[in-house]
């Protein structure tokens, strides 16, 4: 009986940590999408050397990012959102590789975000833990 209580508490803690981690990632991605949607000067200045020129491009990326993030935020569509965000972040990684940016600070930043997205989802979603058991 005590083992079941401990297991239940551990699952509850993992779920809470997963939602906190997911919440932080959602907040970061919504902020990034909002900056792109507003086509802030800092966005336009930093995207130009990457080959993305103009406010329309920034807004298009912002709409895409916001849509994927909203799918990730909703429990019913979170896995689809995570898959789509992984693709979006893969494009960011490829872009930084193409322009020769530094590996750990720029190229792999999308990988870091993707790992945190999936970790948060893994911890908060029992269905995903059932599909990908990391322990026996």
Image (cartoon, rainbow, N blue to C red):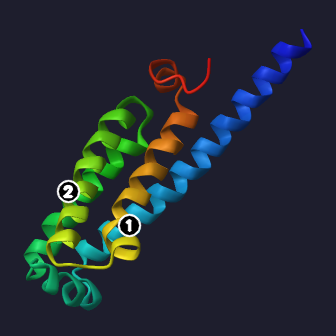
Q: Position of residue 127 (x, y in %)?
A: 48, 21
Q: Residue at 20% across / 69% down in the picture?
A: 97
Residue to which mark 1 is pinned: 109
Nearest to viewer (mark 1 / mark 2): 1
Residue 30 vs 106, above or below: the answer is: above
Label 1 – label 2 distance at C-alpha: 19 Å
Spot the residue most to the right.
2
Q: Secondary structure at mark 1?
A: helix
SS type, badge 2 = helix
| Label ID, residue 64 | 2
Q: Quadrant of residue 77?
A: top left
Question: Residue 94 is drawn in which quadrant?
Answer: bottom left
* Mark drawn on residue 134: none
Position in image of residue 9 (x %, y %): 79, 28
**In this rendering, would 118 be left or right of 85?**
right
How many numbered discs sit on the rendered protein? 2
Query: The C terminus is located in which quarter?
Result: top right
């Amino acid at each position: 009986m005590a083992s079941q209580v401990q297991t239940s508490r551990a699952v509850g803690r993992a779920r809470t940590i997963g939602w906190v981690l997911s919440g932080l990632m959602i907040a970061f991605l919504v902020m990034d999408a909002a900056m792109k949607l507003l086509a802030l000067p800092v966005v336009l200045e930093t995207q130009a050397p990457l080959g993305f020129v103009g406010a329309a491009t920034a807004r298009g990326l912002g709409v895409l990012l916001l849509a994927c993030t909203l799918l990730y935020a909703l429990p019913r569509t979170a896995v689809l959102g995570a898959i789509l965000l992984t693709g979006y972040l893969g494009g960011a990684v490829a872009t930084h590789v193409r322009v020769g940016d530094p590996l750990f600070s720029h190229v792999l930043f999308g990988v870091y975000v993707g790992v945190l997205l999936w970790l948060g989802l893994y911890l908060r979603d029992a269905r995903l833990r059932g599909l990908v058991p990391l322990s026996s």
